[in-house]
């Protein structure tokens, strides 16, 4: 029993060190992606955010603003997926071969189903190209739907006048005037 506990403790310490190293590496993980035409290059940080965006000197002469926006969005999405996959690849060796509670303690329930597997991050298909301008795809300023009427303001509540002989209400919820 002591040998088994010593082995478990050694494995735990080794895996803790591996996890610490993997977390440090994951925090430094980046992805650099470029557009197929070479006009745009993006760097994505470990959190999946855009860290750096570069344009070729002639980018604005060779593309439209709508195409450029789509390219940037696509590169950020692609780079974010690459970063997630790199981090998953760093963590996979640590999580493989972990003993289940049922393996350690006789009669204990298995916890294997509670820990989700690390997913494979695959590149998404490119979204359908957007129209070049609002006029090509319909303008939000030319909405064909009937206008929605504005809500009517609530009428002001008017307190009915009181007779001078009448006593003020005794409720704490009224001002008594």
Image (cartoon, helix red, strand yellow):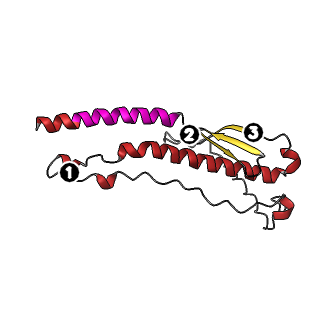
| Label 3 vs label 1, nearer the camera | 3
Is 92 drawn above or below residue 150 in the view shown?
Answer: above
| Label 3 vs label 2, nearer the camera | 3
Is 17 drawn above or below residue 63 in the view shown?
Answer: above
Q: Is residue 59 left or right of residue 152?
A: right
The residue closer to the viewer here, 162 or 79, is 79
- Dot 3 or dot 2: first in sequence order is 2
Q: Is residue 128 left or right of residue 60?
A: left
Residue 27 spot, x, y in % from top left? 51, 34
Sort mark 1 into few (<14), some (14-19) or many (20+) by Cα contacts within 10 Å. few
Circles 3 and 2: CB atoms closer than 8 Å: no
**Which residue was labeled with disc 1?**
102
**Which residue was labeled with disc 2?**
47
Residue at the spot x=48%, y=54% of the render? 120
Circles 2 and 1: CB atoms closer than 8 Å: no
**Which residue was labeled with disc 3?**
54
Residue 35 spot, x, y in % from top left? 72, 49
> For the stretch drawn in magenta, what is the main secondary structure?
helix
Q: Split into 4 quadrants, where in the image is the N terminus? A: top left
> Residue 141 is drawn in which quadrant?
bottom right
Circles 3 and 1: CB atoms closer than 8 Å: no
> Residue 17 is drawn in which quadrant?
top left
Residue at the spot x=76%, y=60% of the render? 130
Is 73 drawn above or below residue 54 in the view shown?
Answer: below
171 magenta-colored: no
Residue 117 spot, x, y in % from top left? 39, 53
């Amino acid at each position: 029993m002591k040998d088994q506990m010593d082995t478990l403790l050694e494995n735990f310490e080794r895996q803790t060190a591996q996890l610490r190293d993997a977390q440090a590496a994951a925090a430094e993980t980046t992805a650099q992606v470029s557009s197929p035409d070479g006009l745009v290059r993006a760097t994505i940080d470990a959190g999946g955010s855009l860290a750096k965006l570069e344009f070729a000197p002639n980018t604005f002469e060779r593309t439209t603003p709508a195409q450029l926006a789509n390219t940037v969005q696509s590169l950020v999405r692609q780079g974010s997926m690459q970063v997630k996959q790199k981090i998953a690849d760093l963590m996979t060796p640590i999580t493989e071969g972990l003993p289940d509670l049922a393996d350690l303690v006789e009669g204990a329930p298995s916890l294997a189903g509670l820990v989700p597997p690390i997913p494979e991050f695959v590149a998404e298909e490119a979204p359908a190209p957007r129209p070049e301008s609002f006029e090509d795809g319909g303008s939000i300023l030319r909405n064909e739907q009937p206008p929605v009427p504005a809500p009517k303001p609530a009428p002001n509540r008017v307190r009915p006048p009181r007779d001078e002989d009448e006593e003020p209400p005794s409720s704490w919820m009224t001002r008594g005037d």
